[in-house]
Amino acid sequence: ISRERPVEHAYITAAMHRLARYRSGRVELWLTPCVVTMPPPRSTALVVPTNERLCGTQFAHFPKGGPTPAAPRIGERDYDRPRAERLLYQCESVDGIVTEFGGAAYESAIADLPLVGGDADYPVRCKTGNAVRVPVATGPLAAFGDGLILAVPPFYASLSWRGQLLNAYSNAFALGPPTRRIATPLLGAGTRGAPVAEAAAVAAEATRDCLAAEAPAVQASIETLLDQDEGESAIQYAPQTIRFCVLDDDVGEIVDSALDEALTWN
């Protein structure tokens, strides 16, 4: 069975609930009003879509679809850009909420990361398509024991959009210990401006690739367990669970369709 669904009335009776499961629970789809403050239960890590500077709410507001302005702080009208579809504010982005709740400890952890490009006015700590992990220990973010995985998705207008978005997922999923339950929003479909259907298709492809890459380690763990003597301590490779989180049913249906098509057993 590729997936399991709750009864339809659950869409009405629960503010945060699981919509579907795939690959025997290796991948899940959840509906939640906020992946930061209301993640799926027992999630151990959170993927945070962010910008190259990892500066979070230093950006007071952000033009959906970009581009990233050169001004030290977005909101300063000293740059030229096309009129954006709309502006997204701090409270409308996962990055903004994480930065707000993380406080000084989170900002300090970001400041400790090495620079990988840019200059004094535009310090780059994570290039597009890459990801870094930072520990958290305060407030609501402390629930993510394996830390926050900061991933930089590309702008939809980028010529290498699909490849960079696949890399962002791949690098994010590869971080941290293997025994983890990763909660993630749909990367690239917010401030980076990608259409939901296209972003969902890339997410599904990246997830399929992640499961395929883990398959040899899972099989080796099973064989090791079968070869152990009775009573011998078993150290298993427990594969990660990837939990995609969406805000509403309409987006959920699109993501579900993409995951179901990509992850159905052959």
Image (cartoon, helix red, strand yellow):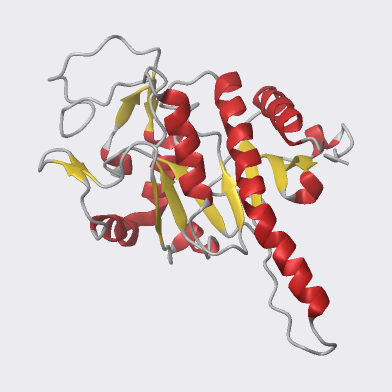
Tell me if 174 is positioned left or right of 232 in this view: left
**Can I make out residue 32 in this image?**
no
Task: Please count the marks in the image.
Answer: 0
Tell me if 11 is positioned left or right of 135 in this view: right
Residue at the image point whose x is 81% and y is 38% from the top: 265
Q: Where is residue 88 drawn, in percent x and y?
A: 39, 26
**Can I make out residue 128 in this image?**
yes
Q: Which image quarter is the C terminus in?
A: top right
Looking at this rendering, what residue extends furthest in the top direction? 83
Tell me if 47 is positioned left or right of 44 in this view: left
Residue at the image point whose x is 74% and y is 61% from the top: 219
Tell me if 261 is positioned left or right of 214 in this view: right
Q: Establish if 132 lies above or below 264.
A: below
Q: Where is residue 204 drawn, in percent x and y?
A: 64, 33
In the image shown, does 217 or 90 lie closer to the viewer?
A: 217
Looking at this rendering, what residue extends furthest in the left direction? 120
Figure quadrant of residue 80: top left
Figure quadrant of residue 66: top left
Q: Establish if 244 lies above or below 68.
A: below
